[in-house]
Amino acid sequence: MQILVLNRGSSSVKLSLYDFKAAPKEPIAPHWEDKIEWKNVWDQGSIEKELSAKLKDKRFDCIGHRVVHGGRKYQKSTLINKEVKEEIRKLADLAPLHNLADLEGIEIFEKLFPKCPQVAVFDTAFHHTMAPEAIVYPGPYEWFEKGIQKYGFHGTSFQYCTKRAQHLLKKLPEKMVICHLGSGASLCAVKNGKSIDTTMGFTPLDGLMMDTRSGNVDPGILLHLLKTQSVEDLSTDLYEKSGLLGLSGISSDMRDVLEASVTNPRAKLSLDVYLHRLCSMIGSMIGSLNGIDTLVFTAGIGENSTYIQDEVCKRLCFLGIHLKKQRDKGIISSPDSKVTVLLIHTQEAFEIALQTFEQMG
Ligand code: ADP
């Protein structure tokens, strides 16, 4: 089966084509990849043209879409029909920045390839196993009745890493914390393969400090700022002018911040705040799990920055974590470490392809 995967990020849409004869036991690479740059809104006409040109020689049997928000309803991926599209549209009330763009993508493909079945793979689905005490915010109960709760995101990555950890360790870890540290970043506490807590919340703005997103801040600050600032401006500040970029004033890319931190005090501060928050939130995930036996680093920063891996493990040394000096992907902790540390190259597109394949039966 030829599966086309669409993975929409904040600045581009990645297209990947996979060929599965059966569900692969090991991750495989797509046999074709390409991407289209975009800026938060689909310019319908030009994107349609670009897609048609890129896909004109390609044959595929189905399409898997990454959809950011599945709300309470979608606990796993699902074949897209009129009703599912309507639900995704309704969920745009909860995630206007994401779901409308995802829906537009689905509709463009419907128009270009009307006979091709499409599957929605939700970023929130992996977290449906979280207990009420983990998802309910302690505001007025009406919030929860209106759908305001912790949903969590990066679910496809966490799901992929959980399966990969099981494969590498030849057993499912009991108490695992996964650190997805990319441009966006979040942690997940996974107990016996199920998400029980995560740092992103109602929106992907919560939790860890990220590239340009603030992560969690005292809500009182927002009330204070809203006396003199519009909601739109505050939203831009929180999503686009905060995080590594906001504090360093240099870059949203961790590589630049790491390099500049040697001489530039604001870059150093930015890095220190990043690490402080990362370690304190790993602690919070460990609290939810009542312990930890496995720690996973994944995504751009998690996989590639030995500095961040070293600093996190140094700060958590009271847990008996020891890293190998030489490290590659896989197990990077030394045999005497009390916590197994894994470095996993997350493959969200492959996971979307796999879930699409499973949905197609
Ligand atoms: P996205 O969420 O956009 O898919 P990625 O998972 O690709 O993001 O992560 C992107 C981030 O990874 C970049 O912004 C960069 O800061 C970081 N990164 C990539 N390579 C390295 C590296 N060698 N050291 C530190 N950070 C890195």
Image (cartoon, rainbow, N blue to C red):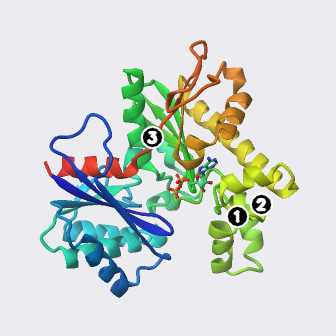
Residue at image coords 56%, 14%? 335
- Circles 2 and 1: CB atoms closer than 8 Å: yes
Residue 247 image label = 2
Determine if the C-beta at disc 3 is less than 8 A from ligand 1: no
Q: Nearer the viewer, mark 1 or mark 3?
A: 1
Determine if the C-beta at disc 1 is less than 8 A from ligand 1: no
Near-viewer residue (271 or 154)? 271
Q: Which of disc 3 and disc 1 is earlier in sequence?
A: 3
The residue that label 1 is drawn on is 242
Mark 1 packing: few (<14 Cα in 10 Å), some, or many (20+)?
many
Mark 3 packing: few (<14 Cα in 10 Å), some, or many (20+)?
few
Q: Is mark 3 on a helix, strand or loop?
A: loop
Residue 162: % across, % down = 41, 35
- Circles 2 and 3: CB atoms closer than 8 Å: no
179 sits to left or right of 280 = left
Residue 216: % across, % down = 66, 55
Q: Distance between the residues labelled 2 and 1?
A: 7 Å
The amino acid type, in three-letter code, at marker 1 is Ser
Residue at image coords 33%, 47%? 29
Displayed quadrant of residue 62:
bottom left
Residue 131 image label = 3
Near-viewer residue (54 or 219)? 54
Q: What element carries label 2?
A: helix
Residue 329: % across, % down = 50, 33
Residue at image coords 46%, 68%? 12
The amino acid type, in three-letter code, at marker 3 is Ala
Residue at image coords 48%, 51%? 152
76 sits to left or right of 179 = left
Residue 79: % across, % down = 20, 59
Q: Is mark 1 on a helix, strand or loop?
A: loop
Q: Which of disc 3 and disc 2 is earlier in sequence?
A: 3
